[in-house]
C-alpha cells in the first residue's frame, strides 16, 4: 500500500541542465554519447540510454555521473546487479553526484539493508544541496526515500520527520500526505492519519489509491461502513483494482456480510496477480465458518500460487491449529517464523501450538521471542507466566506478574494470583487468595475464575468461593 518514490527512476523530470557558455566544457570524446544517453533517459528509452552510456564510458571510464545515470537506467530495466555495480563504481570514485548515492540507497533498500539505505540516502540529500541540477521535487523525493527506509528499519519517528520535510518542500504533492498518513496508521494515530488522507484526496480526488489507503485506516478502526464506501469509490475510479476488491472483501467480513466478501474475493481472483490473495480471503471465510478442511484447501492453493505469501502460510497454520492438527500446524508456523523472524504474531502462534502439545520448553522459547518483538503484549506475558509455572520456574512467573502490574495494577493483581495458584503450595495459595481479595476490593470482576484451570488449586477453598461469588 505504501509507495516508494525513487529518484533513480524518476530523475528525468527532477534533474535539469543549464546551457552556460562560460562553464560549458570543450567537447571531448564520449560527449556526444552522453548527450544521446541523457536524451534517451529523459524519454524513458532505458535500453537506448544504457547503450549510449556504455559507449561513453569506453571513452570516459572514470566519469562518475555517467556511471550513476547508467545505474539508474539499469534499475528501470530491472537489472539490479548491473545497477549496483555501476553505483558502487561511481561511489568508489568519490562521487558527489547525488544520483549515485540515491540509486545505491534504493538498491540497498531493495535487498533489505535498510540502515545502509538510510546512510546512502543521507549522503544523497547532502550532496543534492549543492547540486543545481536537483530541483525541489528531486530533494523532496530523496527525503521520501529515506523516510521509507527509516520506516522499514523500524524507526517511524525518524520516518515522520522526513515525510514532514517532503510536505514542507512540496505541499501540493498528495503522495507525501498518503505516506505520512500510513505512518500515523502504523502508530494507531487514526485521527491524524485521516487528516492526511483527506488532504491527499482534496489534492487529487481521482486517485483510487488514496481511497484505498483511507479505507484501510477505517478497517483498522473498525469503521467497516466507511471502509466499504472508500473501497467502492476506488473501484468506481478503477474497476480492475484488485487490492480494492480484496480490501473490501475483508471490510465485508468485518461488517458480517460474508456472502458479499466471497463475491469480492472471487472477483479479485480473476485479476492478474491477485489469485493467491483471493484464495486467502476465501480461506479466512471458511475459517470463520468453522470448515477447517475447506480452509486448508484454499490456503494450500494460495501457497502454491504464491509461495512467498505470508498471509497464506499464516492462515494455513491457523487452520491446522484450529482443526487440532498440531504437527502440521507446527511445521507450517516454523517455516513462517523462518521466513519472517521479525513478526511477533507468527512466534505467538508457534507458542500456542507448543502449548497445545504441552511442549513447555519449546513454548517458552517462542514466547521469549514474541516478547522481544512485542514487550507490551499482556496476553503473551500471561501465557509465559503459565509456561514458567508449568516448568516450576515460579520466581520467573512472579516476574511476569510484576511486569504486568507495572503497566496495570488491577491486571497485575490477577496475574500474581494466577502465579501463586499455579505454584500450589500452602503459602502460595494464601498469597493467591490475598491478591484476589485486593482485586475484589478494587472492583475487579472474579466471576470467570471458577472455570479457569489455572485456579484449580483454589476451587474448593471457602474463601475463594466467597470471593468469586
Image (cartoon, grey):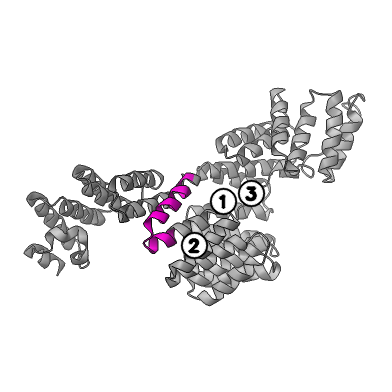
The magenta span reads 318-338
Q: Is residue 410 left or right of residue 367?
A: left
Q: Position of residue 389 (x, y in %)?
A: 21, 48
Q: Is residue 442 left or right of residue 134?
A: left
- Report which residue position mark 2 lands on: 220
Q: Position of residue 15 (x, y in %)?
A: 78, 39
Cβ atoms at labels 3 and 1 below 8 Å apart: no
274 part of magenta stretch: no
Q: Earlier in the sequence, mark 2 or mark 3?
A: 3
Residue drawn at x 40%, y 49% as measured from the top left: 347
- Would you place residue 151 above or below residue 57 in this image? below
**Quarter of the image that includes the N terminus:** bottom right
Residue drawn at x 53%, y 64% as measured from the top left: 298
Distance (Cα) linking label 2 and label 3: 25 Å
Q: Secondary structure at mark 1?
A: loop
Q: Is residue 352 left or right of residue 439?
A: right
- Report which residue position mark 3 lands on: 167
Given this view, does label 2 or label 1 mark the residue nearer the observer? 1
Distance (Cα) linking label 2 and label 1: 24 Å
Given this view, does label 3 or label 1 mark the residue nearer the observer? 1
Q: Position of residue 56 (x, y in %)?
A: 86, 29
Given this view, does label 2 or label 3 mark the residue nearer the observer? 2
From where the camera sits, is residue 132 visible?
Answer: no
Q: Secondary structure at mark 2?
A: helix
Residue drawn at x 54%, y 65% as measured from the top left: 281
Q: In terms of depth relative to the viewer, which is nearer, 216 or 190?
A: 216
Q: Which mark is residue 308?
A: 1
Q: Residues within 10 Å of mark 3 (few under 14, many from 20)?
A: some
Q: Residues within 10 Å of mark 1 (few under 14, many from 20)?
A: few
Q: Is residue 338 left or right of residue 453?
A: right
**Quarter of the image that includes the C terminus:** bottom left
Q: Earlier in the sequence, mark 2 or mark 1?
A: 2
Amino acid at each position: 500500500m505504501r509507495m516508494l518514490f525513487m529518484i533513480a527512476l524518476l530523475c528525468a523530470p527532477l534533474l535539469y541542465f543549464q546551457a552556460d557558455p562560460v562553464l560549458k566544457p570543450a567537447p571531448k570524446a564520449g560527449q556526444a554519447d552522453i548527450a544521446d544517453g541523457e536524451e534517451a533517459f529523459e524519454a524513458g528509452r532505458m535500453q537506448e540510454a544504457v547503450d549510449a552510456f556504455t559507449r561513453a564510458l569506453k571513452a570516459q571510464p572514470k566519469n562518475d555521473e555517467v556511471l550513476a545515470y547508467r545505474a539508474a537506467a539499469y534499475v528501470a530495466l530491472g537489472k539490479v546487479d548491473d545497477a549496483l555495480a555501476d553505483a558502487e563504481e561511481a561511489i568508489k570514485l568519490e562521487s558527489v553526484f547525488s544520483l549515485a548515492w540515491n540509486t545505491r540507497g534504493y538498491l540497498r533498500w531493495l535487498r533489505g539493508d535498510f540502515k545502509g539505505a538510510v546512510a546512502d540516502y543521507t549522503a544523497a540529500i547532502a550532496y543534492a544541496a549543492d547540486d543545481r541540477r536537483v530541483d525541489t521535487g528531486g530533494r523532496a523525493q530523496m527525503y521520501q526515500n529515506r523516510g521509507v527506509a527509516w520506516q522499514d528499519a523500524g524507526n517511524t519517528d525518524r520516518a515522520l520527520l522526513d515525510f514532514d520535510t517532503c510536505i514542507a518542500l512540496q505541499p501540493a504533492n498528495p503522495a507525501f500526505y498518503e505516506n505520512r498518513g500510513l505512518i500515523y496508521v502504523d502508530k494507531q494515530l487514526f485521527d491524524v492519519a485521516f487528516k492526511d488522507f483527506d488532504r491527499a484526496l482534496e489534492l487529487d480526488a481521482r486517485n483510487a489509491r488514496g481511497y484505498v489507503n483511507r479505507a484501510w485506516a477505517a478497517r483498522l478502526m473498525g469503521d467497516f461502513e466507511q471502509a466499504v464506501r472508500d473501497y467502492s469509490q476506488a473501484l468506481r475510479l478503477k474497476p480492475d483494482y484488485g487490492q480494492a476488491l480484496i480490501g473490501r472483501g475483508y471490510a465485508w467480513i468485518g461488517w458480517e456480510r460474508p456472502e458479499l466478501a466471497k463475491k469480492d474475493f472471487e472477483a479479485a481472483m480473476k485479476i492478474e496477480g491477485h489469485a493467491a490473495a483471493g484464495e486467502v480471503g476465501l480461506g479466512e471465510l471458511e475459517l470463520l465458518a468453522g470448515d477447517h478442511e475447506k480452509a486448508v484447501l484454499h490456503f494450500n492453493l494460495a501457497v502454491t500460487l504464491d509461495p512467498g505469501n505470508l498471509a497464506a502460510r499464516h492462515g494455513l497454520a491457523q487452520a491446522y491449529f484450529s482443526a487440532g492438527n498440531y504437527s502440521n500446524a507446527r511445521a507450517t508456523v516454523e517455516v513462517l517464523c523462518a521466513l519472517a523472524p521479525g513478526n511477533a504474531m507468527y512466534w505467538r502462534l508457534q507458542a500456542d501450538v507448543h502449548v497445545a502439545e504441552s511442549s513447555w520448553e519449546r513454548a517458552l522459547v517462542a514466547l521469549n521471542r514474541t516478547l522481544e518483538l512485542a514487550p507490551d503484549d499482556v496476553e503473551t506475558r500471561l501465557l509465559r507466566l503459565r509456561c514458567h509455572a508449568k516448568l516450576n520456574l515460579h520466581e520467573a512467573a512472579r516476574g511476569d506478574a510484576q511486569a504486568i502490574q507495572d503497566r496495570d495494577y488491577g491486571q497485575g493483581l490477577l496475574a500474581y494470583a494466577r502465579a501463586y495458584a499455579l505454584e500450589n503450595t500452602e503459602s502460595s495459595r494464601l498469597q493467591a487468595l490475598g491478591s484476589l481479595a485486593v482485586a475484589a476490593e478494587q472492583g475487579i470482576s472474579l466471576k470467570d475464575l471458577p472455570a479457569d484451570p489455572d485456579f484449580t488449586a483454589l476451587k474448593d477453598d471457602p474463601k475463594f468461593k466467597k470471593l468469586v461469588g
